[in-house]
Amino acid sequence: MDLRRSMLFIPGNNPGMLQNGGVFGADSVILDLEDAVAPMEKDAARFLVAQALRTVDYGASETVVRINPLDTFAAVDIKAIVPCCPDAILVPKVESAADIHQVAAMIAAAEKTDQTPVKIIALLETPCGIVEAYHIAKADPRVVALALGAEDYTAGLGAMRTKEGTEIFTARTIVINAAAAANVQSIDTPYTDANDEEGLLADTQLAKRLGFKGKLSINPRQIDVIHTVFNPSLNDIDWAQQVIHAIRKAEAEGSGVASLNGKMVDLPIVNRAERILHLAELLGLMGGEK
Amino acid sequence: MKNAIGREIPETISGIAAIKPFAGAFTTVPEMTRQAPKVKTIKPTDRKLVDSLVEVFKKIPVTDGMTLSFHHHFRNGDGVVNMVLATAAQLGLKNLTVALSSVFPVHAPIIEHVKNGVVTGLDTNYMSGPVAQAVSKGLFDKPVVLRTHGGRGRAIECGQLKIDVAFIAAPAADEYGNLNGVEGPAACGSLGYAFPDAQYADYVVAVTDYIGEYPLSPISIPQTRVDYVVKVECVGDPKGIVSGTTRITKDPVGLKIAETAAKVIQATGLIKNGFAFQTGAGGASLATAAFVRKMMEKDKVVGSFALGGITGYMVDMLESGLFKKLMDVQGFDLEAIRSLSTNPNHLEIGADFYASPFNAGCAVNQLDVVILGATEMDTDFNVNVVTGSDGVIMGGSGGHADAAAGAKVTIIVANLLRGRLPIIVDKVLTATTPGETIDVLVTERGVAVNPLRADLKEKFLAAGLPVKDIQELKQLAEKIAGAPKAVKTGEKIVAVVEYRDGTIIDVVRQVEG
């Protein structure tokens, strides 16, 4: 399972941040060539990010590069970045499966022969992109996640972006559902007020309840809160352990049906419990006792 | 000869009295009696108010070769040092020693006075700006003495820094010599660094631009120690004296370090009722206080006291009931001044009370935790806060070595890479604080624990903190930035770095140019 609880944007034209991007403990760092970089600085940022991928140790963080949109510098970006072996490319403003086909072909052409295949994360930030979400997710085996970009999306709707996020509710659930149907991850839009920790917490809790597997982040200060929300709680872990215990016991007794606190434990519940325990183990949250 | 931390110290240094090498943080013990200034009397009809500095120079009289002392509470807004030295130059005085607790860029005119022979010695705890640069290039014939804040208090009390005349910049005075720092246009808060000067100088002159009604209240320095009061037009520029607000850093790396430092403190188990804490006013230090505050609030901890340089942030913690007392040797902002003048739980303390190692107990000894910075640290945990990466003097111990020695746990917060330079080296260029008094280094890429503190290491590992060996952290930094070339220095000794107990912990040599 690839952990993408938090995906932190790092401006691609800031050497200090590129050097330190790995210290914040984000599951993914997104070295950004798009919105964070002014048009005049695109080539310098591309060079910097390429060098950073070759030389900087991002530790346990997955390395993702947000390239420019297909109608601007995507082709040059892919050609320069892919041979530097990022784990994934975040493609902005994806609107159709054809966009993904085009990106996948460019990545394949740029990859070195012995290189681990570069993954694709599709950023859906237009009404068209939301409509096409499922087809985008299924367009190519490289696609591992759909991410929602709500700022551009609400502009496209002609709606006002609010902290409550009522205006993006539909888009959020469509992205989550499409991703789940295509068996890829869904990543929520960033919470853009870096000084509002309570707002971030509420927004992230909502994202998790809806089914998102992680959240984009625009500030390292947000990482801890995001992780706290997406980490399984001690109660979750405790429940999951009881489920597994109950099912093992039932199996040992030769019964196919187990129950926990009077409720039947069936396959979806076991799957959910296993996911929680797997995540807890990955995150070192299991403690000594089992 | 080599001192206890392996620094090469010459047997004799021209211009410096008997050299005693550093022998360990608590090894050297005092063998003297306290300094005793001349006993005085004045008649009931005598007045202390003098019209000008020239007149006070003549009355005392100030003569060639004397040591004149000053405090640094006005920081870069100070006008008094320059005024007094200009008067000395005008009167043709020579060979004076300036004992100024810290030197700031505003004190650049000292350079001319040195070139003209008016000033020939400097004794300070910290210096930055043109004077520091000129000292590094060999401005003085005899080395500058760099002390700690507590060490300066000790040197004055023990008669090793004998002050002939203390010129005390006073934001407020009455005509009979009572002084405080909380009133007047140049209000700076605590006058703590001037307390030893007022106690032990042969003559004490208050220089002020605000005369209040007798008796002044509150009284920080009493009339019983003050010989003359000189009213001048303006003692300093408030803009350089205090900042309006102290802000917590927004630098994400600084915040990451601060957050880790707070977790380190939590893991020590010391955040409980009665917690005593000191932190600096800048960068990651203040941010650490913000994270510690959250922990205290969450666990409903009421601390005993916060110590040192006081900012509005600490005042807010006092007023929110997170600390019962503040002990204030130096205030940094308007909030600190307001609180000191109105809150009886905000105590004004002197440099000796704060940190002198040679008395019946100073405040740093009661600290649980102190957060400090560093420009360089070596793999033996010795810290440099005097010279920069170019070998030029850019700071000084201030209370660094004092608080490190006193606190139960001393934590250095620093970026593992500053610009393109690793902070950890094999051997610091200038040792100011001995490794035996440093317990933990917190960087953005991991935490190193002094091998002397295996107890702490165990606690940090149990808390899941990213503990790394200091060598490992050093290699990590060098992998990114490479190992820097050693700074080349000349032969001439431009400053001696005195440990708080009066022994010599290191020397600073001249840089090229």
Image (spheres, coloured by chain):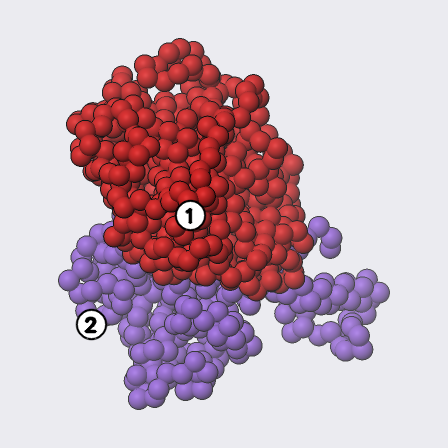
Chain colours: A purple, B red
Residue A63 against residue B319 in the figure, above or below: above
Query: What residue is rendered at 37% in x and 29% in y?
Result: B164
Query: What residue is rendered at 41% in x and 68% in y?
Result: A194
Using the image, name the chain to which the residue with label 2 belongs. A
Using the image, name the chain to which the residue with label 1 belongs. B
* Residue B337 x %, y %: 44, 57
Helix, strand or loop for disc 1: loop
Residue B149 against residue B505 in the figure, above or below: below
Residue B348 against residue A276 in the figure, above or below: above
* Residue A171 x %, y %: 42, 83
Which residue in the protein does label 1 denote? B176
Which mark lies nearer to you, 2 or 1? 1
Depth check: give the residue in front, B386 or B240: B240
Say left or right for A276 vs B204: right
Query: What residue is rendered at 27% in x and 49% in y?
Result: B232
Q: Looking at numbered disc 2 in the image, what kind of residue is underneath it?
A: Asp
Say left or right for B235 vs B157: left
Q: Looking at numbered disc 1 in the image, what kind of residue is underneath it?
A: Tyr
* Residue B373 x %, y %: 43, 42
Q: Which image quarter holds the N terminus of chain B?
A: top left
Number of numbered discs on residues: 2
* Residue A33 x %, y %: 26, 61
Which residue in the protein does label 2 denote? A71
- Is residue B372 visible to the viewer in this orientation of the structure? no
Say left or right for B146 vs B441: left
